[in-house]
Amino acid sequence: MSDTHVLPPFPEEPHRHQPTAPAAAPPPPPRRRRGGLAAAALATVLVGGAAGFAGAAAYDGLAGDDTTAFGSRAETSKVVDTGDQPAADGSSEAVAEKVLPSVVRIVVDGSQGQGSGSGVILSSDGKILTNAHVVEGAGEGAEMTVSFNDGSHAPATVVGVDSLTDTAVIQAEDVDGLTPATIGTSGNVDVGQDVVAVGSPFGLDATVTTGIVSALDRPVNVGTDSEGNATVYPAIQTDAAINPGNSGGPLVDTDGNVIGINSSIRTSTSGATGQGGSIGLGFAIPIDEVMPIVDQLVAGDTPTHALIGVSVRDNPSNDGGAVVPDGAAVGEVTAGSAADDAGLEAGDVITKVDDQLITSSDELVATVRGYRPGDEVELTYRRDGEEQTTTITLGSDAEASAG
């Protein structure tokens, strides 16, 4: 049974299983030998080397080879000094050299236990980006410690958390001179391009894995917040190995620019501990979606998110006998919302936002979350079997909360 879930903070000091060594095979029973064979065997051990050379010389003579001994023709392994070659531009080695100083391990110790995740340095004075579920996982009043690439440590406090985008910013205390990561643009990412993931899977800090971008705009639903709002985002899917403890670490391009924050994985089984391992299906939150939230958290503001102002559900369609998802069906339109202003009605089926096809309610929510309040988008929808389009100016959940 498959399951998509956020990467839980990896519990510290995991049990390490030591496999039992197999019992040694009993020695073979002694064999009876005829008299004189033992002495002959001993003689063979003592003179075997000479006998071998003599045999080789005889063969070489018959073959017409001028070499008279096997040993004179044997080649041995050469030991060479390869030197410390500079990393090639765009190589995984070059990426690691650039990114590792900007990635940290975060250990959280609270009333609900101890775990660890990863983070990305945003400023030289210690502001660090990570996942909300990393800092929230240990409960209220948890203590945090950040471990840097040079081996130093510092306590940290929470600056702000946004559960809807699984984003958090923390502040490492009494530090300076840190190396901030270079923030890239996820909107320029293409399927198939090489990427590198960096973090602390299973507590193994400074771990680098490589892969490609497997898909874009993959709607990932990892649960709901305390108010029942879904944490859904249009993920970058990658086959770079991502495991528990990688949460909050960066997914970067071959120039070392952060294009996403690793957050969740798909597993074939949850296991006894609820922590499945990598099967090559990892998901990162696009950095273009994360950074506006980061700016608001650092400024001390309440994060805002774009919304249409409708409740939606999946719209299953019968296609040749098979039930397939086909758009997001509008259940209710909030009065005075962006959807209401654009003329949407209950029963409409939204099938596209700009050029992004919508096949499910999660995909609609994830796609809209990729925009900011005030953005204009074109919605395509079906009403009574007829396709229609409308331009809508996205609202803000801040307005909804105020209302």
Image: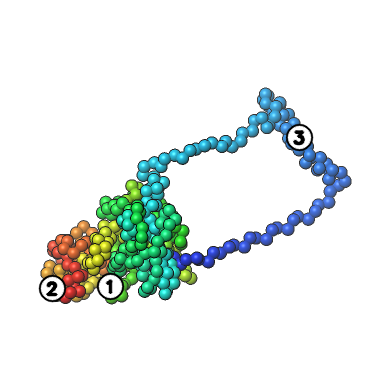
For the residues labelled 3 and 2, the Cα–Cα distance comes to 100 Å
Task: Give the position of the C terminus as an image quadrant.
Answer: bottom left
Which type of secondary structure does the marked residue at label 3 adopt?
helix
- Amino acid tagged 2: Gly
- The location of residue 71, given as percent across then percent down, is 68, 32
Secondary structure under the numbered disc 2 in the rendered image: loop
Instruction: Return the disc, 3 or 2, that comes first in the chain's sequence.
Output: 3
Q: Quadrant of residue 162?
A: bottom left
Residue 163, image x, y percentages: 30, 69
- For image coordinates 81% across by 43% down, the residue present is 41
Tell me the distance, in whole angstroms, between the alpha carbons under discs 1 and 2.
20 Å
Q: Toward the viewer: 231 or 386?
A: 231
Position of 22 with respect to 101 (left or right) is right
Whether label 1 touches label 2, CB < 8 Å = no
The circle on residue 62 is none
Q: CA distance from mark 3 to mark 1?
A: 84 Å
Q: Crowding near pointer 3: few (<14 within 10 Å), some, many (20+)?
A: few
Do the numbered discs 3 and 1 sit on residues whose CB atoms are within 8 Å?
no
- Viewer-proximal residue among 139 and 47: 139
Which amino acid type is marked by label 3?
Ala
Q: Residue furthest front?
A: 174
Residue at x 74% of width, y 36% of height: 49
Res 144 seen here? yes
Is 21 placed above or below 113 here?
above
Colour scheme of the picture: rainbow
Q: Residue 51, labelled with which disc?
A: 3
Q: Which mark is residue 229?
A: 1
**SS for callout 1:** loop
Apparent side of residue 153 relative to residue 169 in the rendered image (left or right): right
* Residue bearing the label numbered 2: 336
The nearer-to-camera label among 3 and 2 is 2
Residue at figure coordinates x 74%, y 56% from the top left: 27
